[in-house]
Image (cartoon, rainbow, N blue to C red):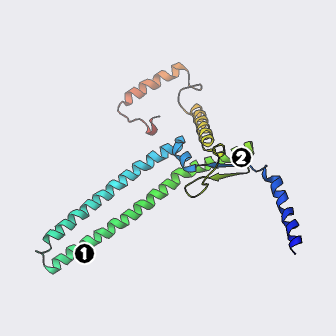
Amino acid sequence: MRNIALPLALSLLIPVAAHAEEVKIGYVDVQRALNEVEDGRQAKAALKKEFDEKQRILDEKQEELRVMKEELDKQGMMLSPEAKQEKLNDFQKRMLEMQQLYFNLQRDLSTREAEMTRGIFERMNRILNQIAEEEGYTVILERNESSILYARPHMDLTNELIRKYNKELERERKAAGGKGGSAGNGAPPEKDKKPKKKKEAAAGTEPPPMGGQ
């Protein structure tokens, strides 16, 4: 039995060894890419603004509870048992409301983050598929705190992903700008633009459109 198993094991290893050199593996630090691509930086700034606003609301609620607790501690000895219990019930009710508010705000932020990054991840995935096809990668892994403890630096495709992402985004924005309504290659003759300028001046105090366009 032992003499049969050894040749069988060797026969299974030979094809693996023969194909091992054909395997090309890369990895990507997706979190770093998300933080460094232009879309990711903009999404991060927007999320931070929303987070700060929600944190401000929580801080105000927490301060209200702190003041209530101090008043309850100071007045506790002077209140009747009924009045003290009423204030205590009110305090506990507000505490539960703040906890519920905290969970709701956390959920809303998670939902907003998913919404704002979904398109970014989809674009990254498409670019990584292009890289794999063009450069012959067998598999591209994600590097994070719990995976890929060590890999050679030349296997890191993060910088290439960031570069290709930003280049593609810039190209798309330039193409979209050329198709927009701003004056450019497709602008009307000069005689048609002068009356438009006078009309805009008459509007005077109208605020500019969102986005600064």
Q: In the drawing, does residue 31 fall left or right of residue 69?
A: right
- Please name whichever residue, 31 or 98, is drawn nearer the observer in this view of the structure: 31
Residue annotated with mark 2: 132
Q: Quadrant of residue 209?
A: top left
Distance CA(mark 2)–CA(mark 1): 62 Å
Which residue type carries mark 1?
Answer: Asn
- The crowd level at tag 2 (other Cα within 10 Å; few <14, some 14-19, many 20+) is some
Name the residue beneath numbered marker 1.
89
Q: Is residue 109 above or below residue 70?
A: above
What amino acid type is highlighted by mark number 2?
A: Ala
x 38%, y 28%: residue: 202
- Say if mark 2 contacts mark 1, CB within 8 Å: no
Q: Secondary structure at mark 2?
A: helix
How many numbered marks appear?
A: 2
The answer to whether any part of residue 119 appears in the image is: no
- Residue 9: image quadrant is bottom right
Which residue occupies the extreme front position in the image? Answer: 3
Question: In what quadrant of the picture does the N terminus appear?
Answer: bottom right
Residue 162 picture location, percent across and down: 59, 41
Front-most of residues 31 and 64 = 31
- Against 26, is 190 above or below? above
Q: Residue at x 17, y 76 (%)?
A: 84
